[in-house]
C-alpha cells in the first residue's frame, strides 16, 4: 500500500502539543469573564471573595504549577484547531498513561478516526481523507481509487514500529515529558487577565517570543491547577488547544477483525511495502 505515513503522522503528531510549547495552535480568543459576570446574580454582601490560589506567585511559578499538575494526570482529552506545515487541522483526542487513545482529526476536508487498544494502533478515514493522503504521496488515480475502495468503512491496522512519531501519538507519558524539554519556554512569562474556559475560572500566563509569536496558557484556579487551554497567535503554527477530562477513563476497544485491513500484511503482499 502506498499511503504516505508522513502525511498521516503530520496530522496526528500535532495533537501531542499538550502544553502548546512544542508547536501547533489557531487564534481563538477565550471568552472573557466580564460577559459571564454580567449574567450572574449579584453576590450577597456577606459573601467572601474567593481565595486566589496563585496570589503572590509570578507567572513563571504559575506555569510550573500547571506543568506539575498536568504531568501527574492519568488521562487527558485535547481538542482544537491547529496549523502545521501550512495545513489547517482539527483534532479531538483522549489518551491515557497506559497507551489507550481514541480520537478524530480533520485535514483537507477529510476526516479520520484513530484508536489504540492493547498497544495496537488503528485508523479509519473517509474518502476525502484517503484521497488527500494518496495525493500527497503522488499516487496515481488508479492507485488512489483502489485504496479508497479497500478502506471504505474499514480500519487500517498500523504495523508496530512503523513510525517513531506515530508510535508516540498515544503515549501520554512521552507527550507530557516533551512539555519540559525546553525549560526556557516557561521562563520570562507575564500574567494576563483572568478568564474562563468552559465555565472554569482560570489564570492566564503569556509568553512572547522574539519572532512575534504569543502563547497564552489558561490554568485552572479551582481544584488542581491543570492546563485548560493554550492559544498561540502569530508565528508559523497558530491555533488553539483545549484540555479537559483529566483522569477520566479512555475506553479504547479494538475494532472487529472483519473491519480491519492489516497494513503490514498488505504491504508484504504488494511487494512494494507501505
Image (cartoon, rainbow, N blue to C red):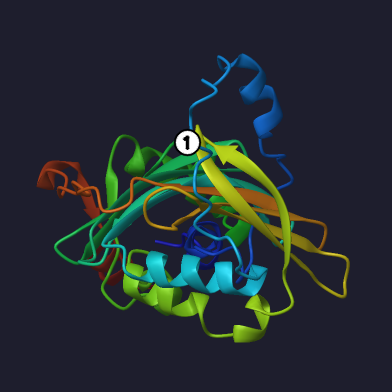
Along the line of sight, the residue nearer the viewer: 41 or 147: 41
Res 61 → quadrant: bottom right
* Residue that appears at 68% across and 50% down: 239
Q: Quadrant of the C terminus?
A: bottom left
Image side of residue 211 versus residue 81, left or right: right
Res 219 → quadrant: bottom right
Secondary structure of the residue carrying numbered label 1: helix
Along the line of sight, the residue nearer the viewer: 74 or 150: 74
Provide residue 15's location: percent of width, then percent of height: 49, 58
Task: Tell me if I can see residue 237 in this picture.
Answer: no
Q: Callout 1: few (<14), some (14-19), or many (20+) C-alpha neighbours within 10 Å?
A: many
Residue that extends furthest to the front in the rendered view of this protein:
46
Along the line of sight, the residue nearer the viewer: 55 or 256: 55
Provide residue 64's location: percent of width, then percent of height: 52, 74
Q: In this view, does 194 lie above or below 57?
A: above
Provide residue 272's location: percent of width, then percent of height: 40, 73
Q: In this view, does 260 lie above or below 183?
A: above
Q: Across the whole image, how many numbered discs are drawn on residues?
A: 1
Task: Tell me if I can see residue 103 in this picture.
Answer: yes
Provide residue 129's location: percent of width, then percent of height: 51, 42
Q: In this view, does 99 lie above or below 227?
A: below
Residue wearing tag 1: 127
Along the line of sight, the residue nearer the viewer: 106 or 154: 106
* Residue that appears at 41% across and 79% down: 164
Image side of residue 183 versus residue 262, left or right: right
Q: Quadrant of the N terminus?
A: bottom left
Image side of residue 183 versus residue 142, left or right: right
* Residue that appears at 60% across and 69% down: 57
Amino acid at each position: 500500500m502506498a499511503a504516505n505515513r508522513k502525511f498521516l503522522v503530520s496530522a496526528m503528531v500535532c495533537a501531542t502539543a499538550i502544553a502548546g510549547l512544542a508547536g501547533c495552535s489557531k487564534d481563538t480568543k477565550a471568552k472573557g469573564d466580564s460577559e459571564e459576570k454580567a449574567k450572574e446574580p449579584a453576590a450577597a454582601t456577606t459573601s467572601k471573595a474567593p481565595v486566589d490560589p496563585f496570589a503572590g506567585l509570578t507567572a513563571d511559578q504559575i506555569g510550573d504549577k500547571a506543568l506539575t499538575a498536568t504531568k501527574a494526570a492519568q488521562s487527558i482529552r485535547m481538542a482544537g484547531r491547529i496549523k502545521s506545515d501550512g495545513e489547517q487541522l482539527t483534532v479531538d483526542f483522549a489518551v491515557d498513561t497506559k497507551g489507550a487513545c481514541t480520537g478524530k482529526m480533520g485535514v483537507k476536508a477529510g476526516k479520520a478516526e484513530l484508536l489504540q487498544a492493547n498497544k495496537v494502533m488503528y485508523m479509519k478515514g473517509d474518502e476525502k481523507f484517503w484521497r488527500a493522503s494518496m495525493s500527497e504521496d503522488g499516487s496515481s488515480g488508479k492507485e488512489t481509487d483502489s485504496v479508497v475502495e479497500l478502506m471504505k468503512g474499514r480500519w487500517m491496522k498500523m504495523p508496530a514500529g512503523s513510525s517513531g512519531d506515530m508510535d508516540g501519538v498515544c503515549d501520554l507519558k512521552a507527550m507530557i515529558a516533551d512539555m519540559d524539554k525546553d525549560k526556557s519556554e516557561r521562563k520570562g512569562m507575564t500574567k494576563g487577565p483572568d478568564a474562563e474556559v468552559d465555565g472554569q475560572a482560570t489564570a492566564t500566563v503569556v509568553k512572547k517570543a522574539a519572532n512575534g509569536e504569543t502563547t497564552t496558557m489558561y490554568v485552572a484556579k479551582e481544584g488542581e491547577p491543570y492546563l485548560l487551554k493554550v492559544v498561540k497567535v502569530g508565528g508559523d503554527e497558530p491555533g488553539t488547544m483545549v484540555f479537559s477530562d483529566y483522569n477520566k477513563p479512555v475506553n479504547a476497544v479494538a475494532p472487529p477483525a472483519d473491519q480491519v485491513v492489516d497494513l503490514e500484511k498488505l504491504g508484504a503482499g504488494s511487494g512494494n511495502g507501505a
